[in-house]
Amino acid sequence: MHLIATSILLIAVTSSPSQSVPVSPERAWERPPGTQLVVPTRSTPAFAPDQSKIYTLSELVNLAEQNNPETRVAWENARARAAELGISEATLYPTLAAAAVAQTSRYDVLFSPLFYRQTVETFSPTFSLDYTIFDFGKRLQDVAISRSDLLAANFLFNDTHRKIIFLVMQAYYRLLNSKGQESAEEANLKNAQTVQESAEARLQEGLSTLPDVLEARSAAAQADYDLQAAIGATEIAHGDLATALGISPTIQFQVESIQDLTIPEELPNTVEQSIDRALAQRPDLMQRVAQLRAARSEIKAARTDYLPTLSVNGSAGLARSYGEQDQSHGVYAPTQETWSAKLSLNWTLFDGFARENRIAKAKADQKQAAAEVDAARDQVENDVWSAYSTARTALRQQKAAAALLAAASESYNAALQSYNYGVRSQIDVVSAQRALAVARTADVSARTQLLTGIAALAFQTGDLLHAKRP
């Protein structure tokens, strides 16, 4: 009966719908009842911003480094590599263990011409020692490998911070750009409404025509349409920045205005200096170099497999024993001394060419790591060159956009004044208003493109990790 119940239980478990594959490739898998997976809550308290405070970029970067889960992932990885280093260093020390053994044995002892049954009961607390005296540096190479792995993990941790800083900066400047575009569209709407009001007033005075008024109304409607699109873009950009900070997109907070930021007038270094800085401090490149060092240590460790190892091990303790034989009285010995010592020289003479293959693999891994360093170096140089060119172009565009905005503002003011005097036509005013709208948009875009370009250059050179923040 018990066997039948067990069989039914096994059939029920193995035929559970949650353990089966989808019935066909053309339809989504339907989750059976009772298989709902619950996403765990955040392991750390989320950032609760002060909605009355205007946050600067440096403050948001600091908050992201504290709150973004990616930094904790990289940190725990580095801690694990540090523990591995401790494990490899522990092999340099002897192992000391304490044990307490209780045993009973019964066997027949031959005293010719008969066998006599003998029973012995023993309780023995002992200490055992095991130590590798010499292994031609194999353990030291294992320690070197672990140190290089830890160094690579630390550089990976730094690179995670570098990426998060740049992610926040990109999202921050996108939000500032959207808010700037929203402000520009609001100004464009006011200008369009001003032109519309002037056209309607002139129509009532008989100085304008209905097509002119309709043209002005169309321009105002288009400006309102563009404003609504800018408001939506601002909401999306706010959510992107909140996600980069590691908080919910529904949490509201305030940031600076693009107009309040200082716009650089020139790039701080030459492209050659920027490339040299990147090659000296980029954490992802340094991670590759650390991995190359680990690969070289792997070759040295594999070569030591050809050499012998010398080790010593032994144990010592006291034993309490009680024994008896057939036709004899039992004997109790409470102070028996037990000890053993052994010096071992182990040398593998043949292992089916496993050592040769381990060395071949280690050499291939070392060459691969060296090639990856070369590829990473080339990529770093190209990244810096591209970022520098983009930032330099953005600098020129920003200066041109500022000049365009100044010229368009003067042109619009002159056209509107002349229109009110009856010197210019409605078409001239609307055209000037649209040109001003384009200039405002271009100015905001150029400002944020320049700031983003300089941030991208600092990201590619690794300067983001060394920037001063409060």
Image (tube, rainbow, N blue to C red):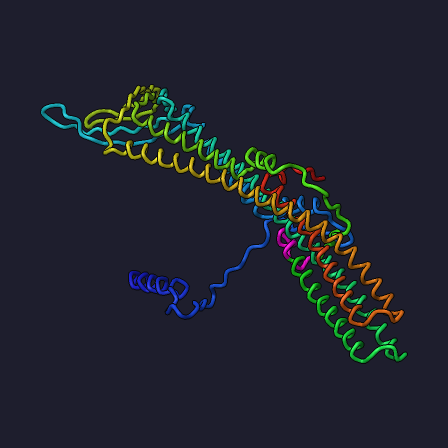
Task: Check if residue 46 falls in the magenta segment.
Answer: no
Q: Nearer the viewer, residue 35 or 326?
A: 35
Horizontal placement of 82 versus 341: left or right? right
Residue 16 x %, y %: 38, 65
The percent position of residue 24, horizontal first and vertical second, equals 37, 69
- Residue 348: in sight, yes or no? yes
241 drawn magenta: yes
> Looking at the figure, which quarter contains the C terminus?
top right
Which residue sits furthest front?
Answer: 423
| Residue at 84 percent of width and 62 percent of height | 413
Q: Please provide percent x and percent y for residue 421.
A: 89, 69
| Quadrant where the N terminus is found in the figure | bottom left
Q: Residue 79: tell me if it is visible.
A: no
From the viewer's perspective, tell me whether residue 111 is left or right of residue 148.
left
Say above or below: 466 vs 19.
above
Q: Is residue 39 left or right of residue 135?
A: right
Q: Which residues are magenta?
A: 240-251
Q: Classify 81 as above or below 323.
A: below
Residue 224: percent from the left, percent from the top?
Answer: 74, 69
Residue 65: name its quadrant: top right
Residue for point 35% across, 36% down: 364
Residue 465 placement, left or right of 327: right
Image point (78%, 65%), residue name: 432
Asked whether 297 or 345 is in front, the reply is: 297
Q: Is residue 115 above or below residue 374?
A: above
Residue lying at 51% horizontally and 41% vertically, measured from the top left: 77
Number of numbered discs on residues: 0
Q: In the rendered image, which quarter is residue 301 located in?
A: top left
Work out whether residue 343 or residue 401 is closer to the camera in this orientation and state it.
401
- Which of the 4 quarters of the picture holds residue 327? top left
